[in-house]
Amino acid sequence: MSESFEVEASTGSYSVQIESGAFERFLTEMPEALVIADAYFQPRFEALGRTAIFVEAHESIKSLDASPALIEEIRSRGAGRQTHLVAVGGGIVQDLSAFIASIYMRGLEWTYVPTTILAMADSCIGGKSSINVGRYKNLVGTFHPPLRVLIDPALAETLPVVDRAGGLVEAVKICFCRGAEAFDKYLACEPGTEMSTEALEKVVALSLRSKKWFIEIDEFDKNERLLLNFGHTFGHAIEGASHYAIPHGIAVGLGILCALEFERQAGVDYAGAPGVARLEAHLEKLIEAVPEVGAHLKGLDLKDVMERFDSDKKHRREVYTLILVNAAGTVELRQIAKNEDARARVESAMRAVIGRN
Ligand SMILES: NC(=O)c1ccc[n+]([C@@H]2O[C@H](COP(=O)([O-])OP(=O)(O)OC[C@H]3O[C@@H](n4cnc5c(N)ncnc54)[C@H](O)[C@@H]3O)[C@@H](O)[C@H]2O)c1
Ligand SMILES: [Zn+2]
């Protein structure tokens, strides 16, 4: 099976192609391109006789500090304005490559081959690059979509379970935000950390087609696209307070559970929205697939989690900006006055989710 579609962006449209087992063909179709690849794939490149600039996928390499060395490396390999860049890797390699492609000689065309479920089902479209500066994560960035996104879902077969679970959390988040039809189709693929490549291919296509709707209607994060931050304000607080021991995708899953609990505390009854219970059950399953999460949750300091929640840059002075689910099961952006009641609800939602083990 293979499928492809176009994503419209202000810089022009770009294509997305999904085909299991096509990785080697993707590379041979671009013999002249300069490749930046996750070092994990070095043996595979060597077996193909293909050179690349290999980078270790650590947060420290997608940083302003680490960029000059890579830019010099690219220059020393003779890259000019016409050079086509290819990035092979997960979100770290994507962010770094997109950033370099957007600034090198005022912009190079590039192709992205995502290799993690998170990157295949979510970050590969949307055009964003986010770069760390000092201790600040994702502080600076650009919009510079690739010319093509080439996805081989079979690459995900070697991914550790934690990355499989985390990637699926972002995929289900997108499908749930898109609405009941997309969410039902997602669950019909029987997604889980042990799913087949064939089923993953369907999930990736569904998630990207759902995300396509958000980014085409709101490319620069002003309205609808903000809904995709579902679970992220609660999640970032948990992720940060765990000092990143709880990885992003898992933290977002926990954050979605918090957002639902926050509304329940205000008396919202989800009995009329059966999708909510199905979402919760699915998230529980994904989180439980990563056994070490329980111990990391136990080690969390609730006060630290609350402080991080309060200082999220999406809030305003008087109000919390949150993505919540109403009683009909629809995701919406809400402004909640910062008062004692709201703080108490945040704390008790956090306590309910953090203390779940
Ligand atoms: N630009 C965006 O829109 C966007 C969106 C979401 C996240 N991000 C960023 O993405 C980063 C996280 O990316 P990620 O979760 O995709 O993973 P990653 O790039 O951090 O990679 C995770 C690990 O998996 C390994 N790996 C990659 N592909 C593999 C494969 N096929 N088999 C085995 N191992 C493999 C990597 O070497 C690394 O050790 C974060 O820095 C986050 O900020 C960016
Ligand atoms: Zn996320």
Image (cartoon, rainbow, N blue to C red):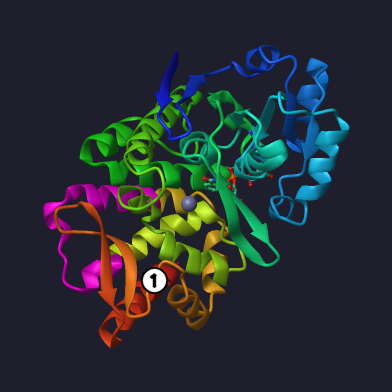
Residue 277 sits inside the magenta stretch: yes
In the displayed structure, does residue 292 sit left or right of residue 257?
A: right
Q: Which residues are magenta?
A: 261-283
Question: Which quarter of the picture shows residue 48?
Answer: top right
Give percent across and percent down for residue 94: 62, 40
The rendered magenta stretch, by its main secondary structure, is classed as: helix
Above or below, 273 against 296 in this view is above
In the displayed structure, does residue 98 sit left or right of residue 227?
A: right
In the displayed structure, does residue 51 sit left or right of residue 332?
A: right
Question: Which quarter of the picture shows residue 86?
Answer: top right
Q: Residue at x 85, y 38 (%)?
A: 73
Above or below, 345 against 102 in this view is below
Above or below, 307 against 150 in this view is below
> From this viewpoint, which residue is outermost toward the left?
272
Question: Which quarter of the picture shows residue 295?
Answer: bottom right
Indicate the quadrant containing the C terminus: top left, top right, bottom left or bottom right: bottom left
**Label 1's element?**
loop
Residue 107 sits inside the magenta stretch: no
Give percent across and percent down for residue 243: 62, 68
Callout 1, which amino acid? His
Q: Residue at x 75, y 26 (%)?
A: 34
The residue tagged 1 is: 315
Give percent across and percent down for residue 263: 24, 67
